[in-house]
Amino acid sequence: MELFNVYPLNDITPVRALGAQLWDDRGQQYLDFYGGHAVISIGHSHPHYVQRITAQVQQIGFYSNSVHIPIQRELARKLGEVSGYEDYTLFLCNSGAEANENALKLASFHTGKSHVIAFKGAFHGRTSGAVAATDNPKIVAPFNAGHPISFLPYDLAEVERVLQEGKTCAVIIEPIQGVGGIIMPSDEFLQGLEQLCQQYGAVLIADEVQSGYGRSGKFFAHQHAGVRPGIISVAKGMGNGFPIGGILIAPEFQASYGLLGTTFGGNHLACAAALAVLEVIEQENLLAHAREMGEYLKQELLQNAGAQEVRGRGLMIGLKYDFPIKDVRDKLLSEHHIFVGNASDPTVLRLLPPLNIKRAEVDQFLQALYAIIPADVRS
């Protein structure tokens, strides 16, 4: 049997990794400036992370979501403390798609409605049952029989027009779009969206699957705008490579047995991985470090990269050019051994290095990029 060929694979077999560096089976060293769509938040093979998971391996043969598992409560307490949402509750699952599906399900139960508002360029998961929220047919055609979704522009008047119809259970938004090309609604837009949701009885869901966990320089990207969503979905950087997701739920939501469900969510190893990430973020002051490195990287790029736009916050950055970036991305990997990402917009180069990236590694990326981008573009 062969693998179902839906991912383009580079002829690279990693055998070892540490921090932002990895090595393949031929001894070639690489700089990881992308981290699997922002999955690697605290760097590869962080010693504290490895120790935390190793200590839980003895529990791997025992798991049930119908018994008391202390590490789940430990994770919930720590996440509330580090994120600033101690009064919220936590539901654990396995991925961002599952987190968003449960977020929309909860919003629908809470309001008794089913319609959802999302935004142009959004990507909220690849599931295709109750919700598959993307308006990009190149990724996956939407199939939303359970939750019909309207994809709107960033226009508060248009949002209000749809909310006035009285059918909307939730407005779901990425505070910084990832797949869409590091598109960022203004703080004022997010504040207006919160007010409209309160006015019309819809749940504001912040999809922080990619932009959360310190990626923007605050724990959550929506915190730059000072809003407090009803539900916050998380995954990717939450486990630093170990599959885990979840939703943070505001106090006004009432839990009941059987309301939400998951098979593997909250298992011992996933919780240990997530705890390790939070502990490292806190102990190594990675929110401040992400802000500092992000500001340095953006300033350098604004001055020297020749891009039409330099988008994003913290260490979630997109470079918008007036030409497709595929060749740039390919040369960064083949000639300079640096992993970067693309977006649904073929002219956007996506940068998502680990939150503990070193300044020398940032400079290594910048020198490589400048060597590839033609001088007349950069001038």
Image (cartoon, rainbow, N blue to C red):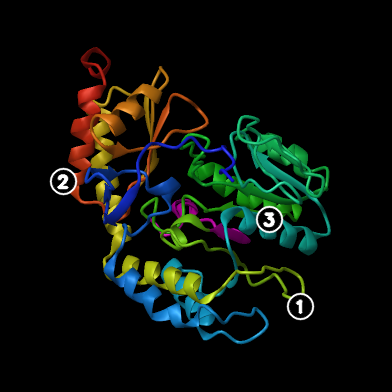
Q: What's the distance in space between the residues labelled 3 and 1, CA to CA?
A: 18 Å
> What kind of residue is marked 3?
Glu
Q: Are marks 3 and 1 in contact (CB under 8 Å)?
A: no
Q: Please tell me which residue lies in front, 75 or 184.
A: 75
Quarter holding the C terminus is top left
Q: List the residue tagged with mark 1.
A: 257
Number of other residues with Cα within 10 Å of mark 3, as a class: few under 14, some 14 to 19, many 20 or more: many
Q: Position of residue 149 (x, y in %)?
A: 74, 41
Q: Secondary structure at mark 1?
A: loop
Q: Is residue 231 magenta?
A: yes
Q: List the residue tagged with mark 3.
A: 101
> What kind of residue is marked 1?
Tyr
Residue at image position (68%, 36%) is 151
Q: Position of residue 122 (x, y in %)?
A: 59, 39
> What kind of residue is marked 2?
Ala
Q: Relative to 10, is 257 above or below?
A: below
Tell me the magenta residue range.
Answer: 218-234
Q: Position of residue 178 (x, y in %)?
A: 49, 41
Q: Is residue 64 magenta?
A: no
Q: Earlier in the sequence, mark 1 or mark 2?
A: 1
Q: List the residue tagged with mark 2.
A: 360
Q: What's the distance in space between the residues labelled 1 and 2, CA to CA?
A: 51 Å
Answer with the quarter of the image where residue 365 lies.
top left
Please give left or right for residue 314 compared with residue 358 in the image. Answer: right
